[in-house]
Amino acid sequence: MVNTVPNLGVMALEDDGRVDFARLRRQRRQRVLDAMAERDFDVLILGREANARYATGARRLWMSGTRPFAPGCVLVHANGSVHLLNNWDEGIPTEIPRDHLFGLSWNPVTYVERLKGIPGLTSARRIGVDAMTPLWRQLLGLVAPAAELRDAQAMLLELRMRKSAEELRCIRTAVAIAEASLAAAIDALRPGIRERTLLGAFNRRMTAYGITAPSMEGTFCAIEPGPVGSRARVRRLTSDRHIDAGALVALSGGVLYAGYEGAVGRTWPCIGPGTGMAAVRAEHRDLRRRWTAVWNRVADRCRPGATGDDLRAAYEASGETLPPFPIAYSVGIGYEAPIAGSSLGPIFDRRWRLEPGMVLGVQAYVAGSAGGYFGLETVLITPDGHEVLSSLSHGPLLEAD
């Protein structure tokens, strides 16, 4: 008998399966156009790839790191037309005509002439930009001499933070792939293995699901005990070091599915396969209990109306020291913004108020002389609280209670 029920699992392609990507693109673009109307933007000129992908759905080469601003995407409000900087139509949605693509050039003046050919741009009164350089401020003056340039990054970030049902399906899929990939790294963990071998196990499993690039390099690092009376520090950069038996290992990774990030982080004891629970040290179980106490305090504040400063205060009320990284950050099409516990301080954290539909990466780290415990969960803010999207077990340290 032939099975006629489709399998819509995590290996579904981006243009099929559980997500209606055409509807997703329409929804996102309409949200951007509505926001443009509210702010009286005639045109958006976008240089940040995450913003361009959100507004258009285009899958272009996504390079990480710092690079100069360029007008990679133009969205005209009057007719809703999209124009993209791209040399070919691979990865460009079918609703964007091929003659709306303009090619790469090393000559800025060439860009100026191509932008002048976009209907509605030269006569624009107000243009929103998500970044800017002094050179392009001058060049855009040649393209639209009467236009006022205004910041649009805050508007776009606000739109991207509130996820639709289709976006949440993408994030749930990304989380599932991240957990399966991290589980493969955990399965490979044994005394004497190199940290980079664990990273390789994560990436190998990730690619088995058709994902070719992680959302971040990942952390696969042994947490080395500190001197008596001091705190062990967690490294975030994976090395070629061998992992000793009995060491605690921080494992964290993320993947992108259709551009949306899913991530998970755990700490696992290196006790080898088939080793009994007696090998789990009591002081390591205590670290996990401390981490759980911090997590529960912060998670309790993950609800609509709370601010990033509320999350920071909950963490500090646990008596644990803030880690050297944000304790909560917004995720969607990649990393969006720190929400709580960054080096920008409490005043910055008060700017962010949690709303239903926001998805956060919430992470905590506790440490002592016996080592440290790191954990990262992906959390959805719901109308009446929150939902933890990640479900991977905390393993032997949890089961040893």
Image (cartoon, rainbow, N blue to C red):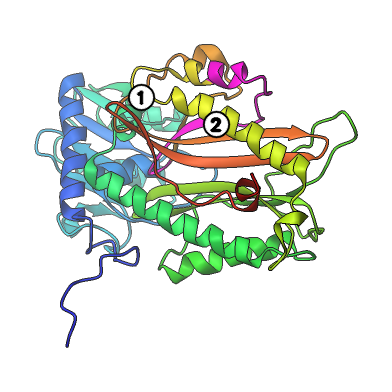
Residue 323 among magenta residues: yes
Residue at (21, 34) in percent of width and height = 32
Q: Earlier in the sequence, mark 2 or mark 1?
A: 1
Q: Position of residue 56 (x, y in %)?
A: 24, 47
Q: Is residue 352 shown in magenta?
A: no
Give the class, few, some or many, for how many residues have Cα within 10 Å of label 2's Cα (few <14, many ≥20): many
Residue 81: quarter of image: top left
Q: Secondary structure at mark 1?
A: helix
Label annotation for residue 295:
2
Residue in the foreground of this view, choosing between 323 and 400: 400
Q: Is residue 62 above or below residue 341?
A: below
Mark 1 surroundings: few (<14), some (14-19) or many (≥20) residues within 10 A:
few
Identify the residue at horizontal 56%, vertical 47% (top origin): 265
Q: Quadrant of residue 117?
A: top left
Give the amino acid type for the residue marked by disc 1 in the picture: Ala
Q: Are marks 2 and 1 in contact (CB under 8 Å)?
A: no
Question: What is the secondary structure assignment of the residue under circle 2?
Answer: helix
- According to the picture, the residue beneath numbered tag 1 turns out to be 154
Along the line of sight, the residue nearer the viewer: 349 or 305: 305
Q: What stretch of residues is rendered in magenta?
A: 312-334
Q: Quadrant of residue 302?
A: top left
**In the image, is residue 284 above or below residue 36?**
below
* Residue 105 visible to an observer of this rendering: no
Q: Nearer the viewer, residue 117 or 215?
A: 215
**x, y percentage for residue 290?**
65, 32
Seen in the image, is 136 located left or right of residue 58?
Answer: right
Task: Confirm whether residue 18 shows in the render.
Answer: yes
Where does residue 380 sit, x and y in percent of width and height?
A: 36, 36
